[in-house]
Image (tube, helix red, strand yellow):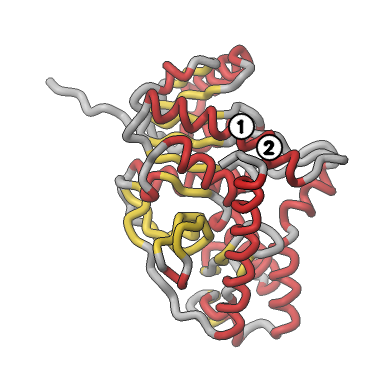
Amino acid sequence: MATTRRPKISVIGAGFVGSTCAHWAASKELGDIVLIDINGDAAKGKALDLFEASPVEGFDSNLQGGSDYALTKDSDVVVITAGLPRKPGMSRDDLLATNSKIVKECAQQVAKHSPNAVLIIVSNPLDAMCHVAHAASGFPRERVIGMAGVLDSARFRSFVAMECNVSVEDVHGFTLGGHGDTMVPMPRYCSVGGVPLTQLVSKERIESIVTRARKGGAEIVELLKTGSAYYAPSASVIQMVEAIVRDKKRILPCAVMLNGEYGVKGLFCGVLAKLGAKGLEAVPELELNAEEKDLFGKSAAAVQTLVDDLKRLGLS
């Protein structure tokens, strides 16, 4: 009797975000999971620890860890979380130089061992690292996707639910554009139980919610003191992974290389994207008003600056 092959999901980088990605993916039984890290024993230990939780939680997933990319062979989806956070005294150029080298090596290894995989990039600065991974892997744009929009949208929706004192399940909305300061809020398209947000919350309070969402990561860094967010970022990654391995055709905000949509070509930027078994399957293009067009244009310009910096530093 023929057995059905489970999807294979590899996560590069076994830090807080990467290991928590493995945790969410295993608990949802999305497939077999491989954790890869420069510290192979740490990756192996975390994979083993998670596997030993499976009898308690009742999930079936084979889990492996190590430093050898051969373990990732024939992965369906590969998530790259590897990279350093920006540290005190480190310039943007320093961060670009360091992380682009890490992401380039990861993407090349992925292409070597899993030439048909879909790549999900989490490393920062996100949009620039998508460009690095796209070039290094040689994959088509459909199979290189950046995670940030799902996270920013989740933060926005969380704060809307808090403001309206309702279940997060009844809040629908999203953000476009880059991660952080250049985020493009879309309150016009946000609803609470089907009611437009703009009918429930004042413009001033919406602006306050948007500001908090933009600074959501920084707020957590300030509270943690010695680290950054990982529960919400990893959950956001796994929502994308699930859409791909289960061919769900989800419409999610992701960083994808635009090919003329919104008047932008050859640049990774956050937009709504349909995700399925092939990776990116479509970019539903929204009608933006003048303010939204202006904000999206500024966000795309900020991404272009990062890409230009990569070229200037000889990293692209």
Give the residue number, with chain letter if any, for mark 2: 97
Q: Is 109 located above or below residue 239 in the figure?
A: above
219 left or right, relative to 66? right
Q: Amino acid at mark 1?
A: Lys
Give coordinates of residue 221: x percent, y percent.
79, 46
Of residues 175 and 61, the one drawn nearer to the viewer in this rendering: 175
Amino acid on which the number 2 mark rests in the picture: Ala
Say which residue label 1 marks.
Answer: 101
Q: In x, y percent, where is residue 13?
A: 59, 29
Residue drawn at (36%, 35%), measured in percent from left and top? 117
- Disc 2 is placed on an element classified as helix
Which residue is outermost to the left? 1
What x and y, as percent, mark residue 272?
45, 63
Name the residue at 46% across, 55% down: 256
Left or right: where does residue 314 sit relative to residue 218? left
Give residue 66's position: percent from left, percent from top.
Answer: 53, 15
Of the 4 image quadrants, the one containing the C terminus is: top right
Q: Is residue 84 left or right of residue 17?
A: right
Q: Residue at x 63, y 57 (%)?
A: 179
As drawn, 106 above or below 235: above
Question: Callout 2: 10 Å neighbours few (<14), some, many (20+)?
Answer: some
Asked if marks 1 and 2 touch (Cβ < 8 Å), the reply is yes
Q: Is residue 157 above or below residue 45?
A: below
For the residue labelled by badge 1, is the local secondary structure a helix, a strand or a loop?
A: helix
